[in-house]
Image (cartoon, helix red, strand yellow):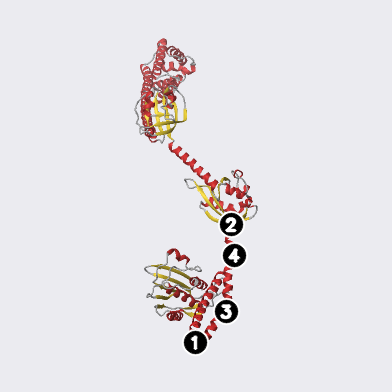
Amino acid sequence: MSGLAELLATRREDILRRFERAVRSHFPTEGLTRSAIIDTVPALLEELSVLLQHTLAGGAPQTAPSQVRQRAEQHRLQRLELGYDFAQIVREYGLLRDCILELQEELGGPFSLQEQRLVHRALDLAMSDTVSEARRWQEARQRTADQERAELLARERQARAETEEQRALLERIIAQSGDGIIMADAQGVLRILNPEAERQHGVPLRVVGSAEWVERYGLTDEEGRPLPLEQVPLYRALQGEFVRDLILWVRRPDGTRLPLSVTAGPLRRPDGTLAGALLSARDVALRRALEKEREEALALLDTLLDTAPVGLSFLDRELRYVRINPALAALHGLPVEQHLGRIAHEVVPELAAPTEPYYRRVLETGEPVLNVELAVRTPGRKGELGYFLVSYTPVKDREGRTLMVGTAVVDITDLKRFEERLRQTAEFRERFLGIVSHDLRNPLSVINLSANLLLRQETLPERALRLAQRIALNAEQMGRMIADLLDLTRGRLGGGIPITPAPADLDPLGRRVVGELEVAHPDRELRLEARGNLQGEWDLDRLAQLIGNLLKNALDYSREGTPVTLSLQDEGERVRLEVGNRGEPIPAELLPLLFEPFRRGGSRAGSASSGLGLGLFIVQQIATAHGGTVEVRSSREEGTVFTVRLPRMAPRRP
């Protein structure tokens, strides 16, 4: 082992003591232990000794093997953890070199130049690595700083953009607000007056101080007097006061006055100092008008409820009475106050069962249920059975949701009783007519028979013959009237006119009836049009009566010289029969009434008939008995046409 290598190996502890003293004298080492100061230095000295021994043993000269550089890097990292900077680390390597050289001089031994060169190169390389690392660290730190600066600038730009966006959004919100917004700075100078505020006051923004507010913006009290400045909500807010929901009146340049509901408060900076004041104002003219309209509507409703002759009530979705008028409350036998807020089942349990399903249906469907007839016993009638016509109507909000059910109750008990008396009277009258008509047939038959016997007498004087002919003619007419009255009685009381269907053909029947009427009316033209298969099963006598009644009616109500047409038409499973004439059109309001008993269609074209007005009623009854229908249409262009449609097989009664 040579001198310097031996020195590093045998006098290592001496070098470390010298190194510790040097470090403590050059650097602030308060609180650092000896092990913390020397830490990686013994390993570094060991690597230097190995380097020298390898060279003296004949190995190839090495400037600094990787082991020395690794130990130097460990030393550098340890020192950085202790808070050293790179200059101090480089300075430490210099102190270590000085300690080795100082000990070498004291010992004065033979140290080869090659050994010294290797030690110096190793320490220089450690210093160089530290400087390079310092440069890389500085560059990395600079890059980090630049990146952080760039990120900071980007965040600043983004924050500025967001601030501008929020400012623009705030300006749009203020501009588009449905409330008037006014802002004044701490000196009382107006800075913001949004479009709604301009509309409310009728003037645009003008940068004025608080002394000009009242006059410029027409601030008044309810009586129209100028508002004192100390009572102006925005001015009060500048004094630190919060004002909420105060009614302020504004007189606009056009002379109109507007009520505003205002709220105002101070604006303060983060440090609490006053920055200004903000006021929001809402136009309550519409709200007041709506409130007035609502009050008037409620007053009208109350008047209607109190004075209506029918029962009225409103029930909510739980079927609790919200309103009820005295008329309905009287039917229930309770005062109005004992209904309100209570469910129907509690108030009138005997009425809840029949009425609740209708309430539920209206609430579920939102559709009204009208004119429901109820027969119930109510306390207001002392338990007597009454008849009522009830309508249930939904009460909806603006969105169409059903909130309540309105009920209208009409007491029809007296009407029902009156209708029953009328029905009984009509039934008695019709039974009386039937009985009388039936009883008249026998004496009339005697009169008719006697007249016919007289007509057969060849020796009867001329004057007596004319009297017998007149008796026979009038007896025949009376017979037809009695037959009509009997048919009326059967149609109204006996379940309809009886028929006896049998195979028949309408063509010969129509020709026979037309022929008979041509004899009775030789001066009138009757036409018959028959097409297709006109066979079926009908009561021929009754159909002859039907056709005869329609043709006689057409002859009576048509002008002289105009034809009357009977049309028979095959329609497959049905047969259509039409009788038309060219008389004056029947008024539209009379058309639905023509088939009622004792009705006529208007003025006749010829002389008055001695009939009872039962012909068309009997036509309808005969058509109905055959399962058919009868209709009428009348116009000046087409004339009057009666249409009967019959199924080919008339129904048979059991």
Q: Residue furthest right?
A: 383
The numbered disc on residue 414 is 2
Q: Residues within 10 Å of mark 1 (few under 14, many from 20)?
A: few
Q: Dot 3 corresponds to which residue?
A: 443
Q: Secondary structure at mark 2?
A: helix
**Residue type pointed to by label 1:** Pro
**Pointer 3 with pointer 4, Cβ within 8 A:** no
Viewer-side label of 2, 3: 3
Mark 3 and mark 4: span between their CA atoms?
Answer: 29 Å
Give the answer, above or below, for where 160 lies relative to 1.
below
Mark closest to the chain's N terminus, 1 or 3: 3
Mark 4 and mark 2: span between their CA atoms?
Answer: 15 Å
**Residue type pointed to by label 2:** Asp
**Residue type pointed to by label 4:** Gln
Q: Dot 4 corresponds to which residue?
A: 424
Mark closest to the chain's N terminus, 4 or 1: 4
Give the quarter of the image for residue 524: bottom left
Mark closest to the chain's N terminus, 4 or 2: 2
350 or 84: nearer the eye? 350
Q: Dot 1 corresponds to which residue?
A: 461
162 or 330: nearer the eye? 330
Q: Residues within 10 Å of mark 3 (few under 14, many from 20)?
A: few
What is the number of callouts on the image?
A: 4
